[in-house]
Image (cartoon, helix red, strand yellow):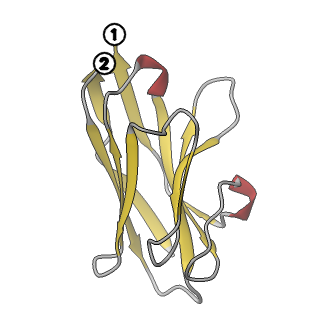
Amino acid sequence: VQLAESGGGLVQAGESLRLSCAASGRPSSTYFTGWFRRQPGKERECVAAISWNGDSTRYGDSAKGRFTISRDGAKNMVYLQMNNLKPEDAGTYYCAAGPGGPNYVSPSRFEYMNWGRGAQVTVSS
């Protein structure tokens, strides 16, 4: 499956942004999808992840209460709604997918096989 992110940009602290991930191709199995953030000098971290059927989600500590991941299976889209953005949320956001059962989701980057090219998010204070 190929992944393409969109929706990144520059916002001010406190504002919102929605990232979109479009999946294309014919996957060999059901897969879970995650959003990862990369910041300079830090490991790529899972911000949020969602199962194939959308019933299971995981959030990183920094995202809880502010970010929401959702999935539109009919459109092969996954979204990350980010509210009340902070300067420390800035970074490159990657959409990724990994093979798993319909209700499976993982925050581990090692379980993701396919990655998009990333979308830049900048938050000014």
| Residue 101 left/right relative to 21 | right
**Badge 1 element:** loop
Instruction: Quarter of the image for the C terminus: give it.
Output: top left
Left or right of residue 111, residue 4 in this image: left
In the displayed structure, would residue 111 be above or below residue 6?
Answer: below
Q: Which residue is mark 1?
A: 125
What label does residue 69 carry, if any? none
* Residue 91 x/y as whole percent: 49, 30
- For disc 1, the neighbor class at 10 Å (few under 14, some 14 to 19, many from 20) is few
Q: Residue at horizontal 29%, vertical 82%? A: 74
| Residue most extreme to the right | 110
Under mark 2, the amino acid is: Ala
- Of 75 and 66, the residue lying toward us: 66
Percent of width and height locating residue 29 = 59, 88
Residue of label 2: 13
Cα distance in 3D space between marks 2 and 1: 5 Å
Q: Is residue 61 visible from the viewing direction of this image?
A: yes
Above/below status of 12 relative to 6: above
Nearer to us in this view, 56 or 7: 56
Residue at image location 40% in from the left, 42% down from the top: 67
Helix, strand or loop for disc 2: loop
Q: Position of residue 106 (x, y in %)?
A: 65, 61
Between disc 2 and disc 1, whose residue precedes? 2
Q: Nearer the viewer, residue 103 or 117?
A: 103
Residue 35 visible in the current orientation = no
Q: Are marks 2 and 1 in contact (CB under 8 Å)?
A: yes
* Amino acid, disc 1: Ser
The answer to whether residue 1 is above or below residue 57 is: below
Quarter assignment of residue 87:
top left
Residue 98, image x, y percentages: 62, 70
9 left or right of 63 in image: left
Residue at 58% x, 36% y is: 61
